[in-house]
Image (cartoon, grey):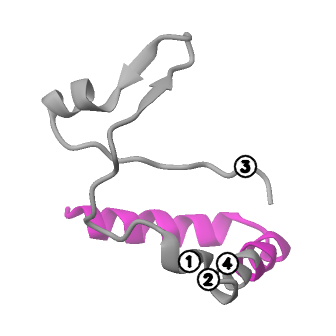
């Protein structure tokens, strides 16, 4: 299964699990980001993130350049509750 197909599957499942009122709120927020130009500043699909360091759940620093030695990374930002 390709990454694109897997992401489509996840989106489909997510759309079925999230209450309609929450989905409406998320879509409004996305529309606002598009209208105010913020969406034009995001990093596009297939573009490279700058190198970064983040702490994991144990407080250990993870460096993207070290993780990339194991293969490609998928970076996901979880916004939390809408």
As for residue 23 lying within the magenta part, the answer is yes
Q: Are marks 3 and 4 in contact (CB under 8 Å)?
A: no
First of labels 1, 4 by sequence position: 4
- How far is disc 3 from disc 1 in space, using C-alphas? 19 Å
- How far is disc 2 from disc 3 in space, using C-alphas? 22 Å
Circle 1 residue: 39
Image position, residue 51 (x, y; %): 32, 38
- The image's mark for residue 80 is 3
Q: Are marks 1 and 4 in contact (CB under 8 Å)?
A: yes
- The image's mark for residue 81 is none
Circle 4 residue: 33
- How far is disc 2 from disc 1 in space, using C-alphas? 5 Å
Q: Residues within 10 Å of mark 4 (few under 14, many from 20)?
A: few
Quadrant (top left, top right, bottom left, bottom right) of the N terminus: bottom left
Q: Are marks 3 and 1 in contact (CB under 8 Å)?
A: no
Q: Are marks 2 and 1 in contact (CB under 8 Å)?
A: yes
Secondary structure beneath disc 3? loop
Q: Is residue 66 above or below residue 24?
A: above
């Amino acid at each position: 299964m390709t990454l694109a197909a897997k992401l489509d599957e996840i989106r489909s499942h997510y759309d079925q699990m999230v209450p309609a009122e929450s989905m409406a709120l998320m879509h409004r927020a996305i529309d606002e980001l598009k209208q105010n130009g913020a969406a034009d500043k995001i990093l596009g699909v297939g573009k490279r993130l700058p190198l970064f360091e983040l702490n994991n759940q144990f407080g250990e620093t993870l460096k993207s350049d070290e993780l990339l030695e194991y293969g490609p990374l998928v970076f996901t930002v979880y916004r939390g509750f809408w």
